């Protein structure tokens, strides 16, 4: 009997010690996280994207409501977007708009370009920019000395461009319009190549219907007169208003 009592007391003491040890606070070393638990990059992120809601599945992220993506000089806004990380691309829908601001050393102008369409695609890995259906592009160019400002509006069915190329290609029911000033210009064609660094619009049509209506100064009257350029290809400088047809 006495032996059993001693055994029970010893067992109680052992259990009590274990319980007390379990309740003791852990030493600080036990709280040190692994080296890769929290990684804070020193460099700025390549792009910042915000939205009201986010849903991820099968490697594709769906962003809904007041989506805004900022990267370098580009600001993309829309109501909905699909985002992929590998490869990296974003497809914007529901009233998408892409704003880009850049300085062009060759012509010493600051260019602001705004693109709207039903769909806008931006690919980082392939450097592709594309927009489809009811594309509207507004291009504002201001010279560095603020002496000259021009606005060009281009509409088309489709738009495609590459990050490493100066060329934007518009196709399908292309129209160009310069609304500002006393003598607005306009034109149309099947395709328009816009050379960004040189502010050149190249309209083309296989049927020879490419057209630019512009204005030139008559040296005899010192008045501007309307001039139409028509052909398979019309090259037009949106800054100087000079043009030739072929």
Image (cartoon, rainbow, N blue to C red):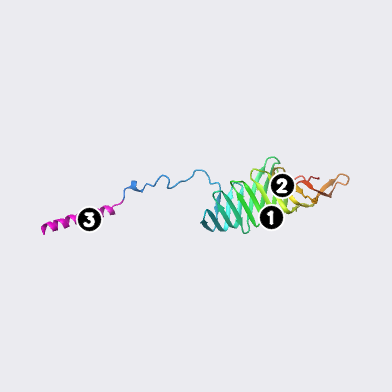
Q: Residue at x 15, y 56 (%)?
A: 7
**Number of other residues with Cα within 10 Å of mark 1, as a class: few under 14, some 14 to 19, many 20 or more:** many
**Number of other residues with Cα within 10 Å of mark 2, as a class: few under 14, some 14 to 19, many 20 or more:** many
Q: Residue at x 61, y 53 (%)?
A: 76
Q: What quarter of the picture does the C terminus occupy? A: top right
**Residue 225 pos. (x, y %):** 84, 49
In whole angstroms, how far apart are the C-alphas of marks 1 and 3?
A: 77 Å
Give yes or no for residue 130 being in the magenta stretch: no
In whole angstroms, how far apart are the C-alphas of marks 2 and 3?
A: 83 Å
Residue 15, disc: 3
Which residues lie in the magenta part?
1-25
Q: What quarter of the picture does the N terminus occupy? A: bottom left
**Residue 165 pos. (x, y %):** 66, 43
Task: Name which of mark 2 and mark 1 comes first in the sequence.
Answer: 1
Residue 163 versus residue 177: which sits nearer the camera?
Answer: 163
Q: Residue at x 51, y 56 (%)?
A: 56
Task: Name which of mark 1 and mark 3 comes first in the sequence.
Answer: 3
The residue under label 1 is 135
The residue under label 2 is 194
Task: Name which of mark 2 and mark 3 comes first in the sequence.
Answer: 3
Residue 70, disc: none
Q: Decide if residue 61 is on the left or right side of residue 12.
A: right
**Residue 183 pos. (x, y %):** 80, 52
Q: Residue at x 69, y 55 (%)?
A: 135
**Residue 180 pos. (x, y %):** 75, 52
Mark 2 residue element:
strand
Q: Residue furthest right?
A: 220
Give yes or no for residue 5 being in the magenta stretch: yes
Residue 104 versus residue 231: which sits nearer the camera?
Answer: 231
Residue 201 versus residue 23: which sits nearer the camera?
Answer: 201
């Amino acid at each position: 009997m006495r032996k059993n009592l001693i055994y029970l007391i010893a067992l109680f003491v052992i259990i009590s010690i274990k319980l007390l040890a379990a309740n003791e606070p852990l030493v600080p070393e036990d709280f040190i996280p692994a080296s890769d638990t929290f990684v804070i990059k020193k460099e700025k992120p390549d792009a910042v994207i915000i939205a009201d809601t986010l849903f991820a599945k099968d490697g594709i992220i769906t962003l809904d409501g007041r989506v805004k993506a900022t990267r370098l000089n580009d600001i993309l806004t829309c109501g909905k977007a699909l985002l992929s990380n590998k490869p990296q691309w974003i497809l914007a829908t529901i009233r998408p708009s892409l704003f880009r601001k850049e300085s062009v050393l060759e012509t010493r102008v600051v260019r602001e370009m705004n693109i709207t369409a039903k769909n806008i695609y931006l690919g980082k890995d392939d450097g592709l920019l594309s927009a489809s259906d009811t594309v509207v592009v507004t291009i504002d160019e201001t010279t560095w000395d603020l002496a000259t400002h021009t606005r060009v509006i281009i509409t088309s069915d489709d738009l495609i461009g590459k990050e490493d190329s100066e060329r934007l290609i518009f196709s399908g029911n292309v129209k160009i319009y310069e609304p500002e000033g006393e003598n607005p210009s306009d034109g149309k064609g099947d395709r328009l190549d816009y050379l960004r660094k040189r502010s050149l619009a190249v309209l083309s049509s296989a049927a020879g219907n490419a057209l630019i209506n512009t204005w030139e100064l008559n040296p005899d009257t010192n008045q501007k007169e309307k001039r139409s350029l028509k052909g398979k290809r019309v090259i037009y400088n949106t800054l100087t208003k000079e043009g030739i047809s072929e």
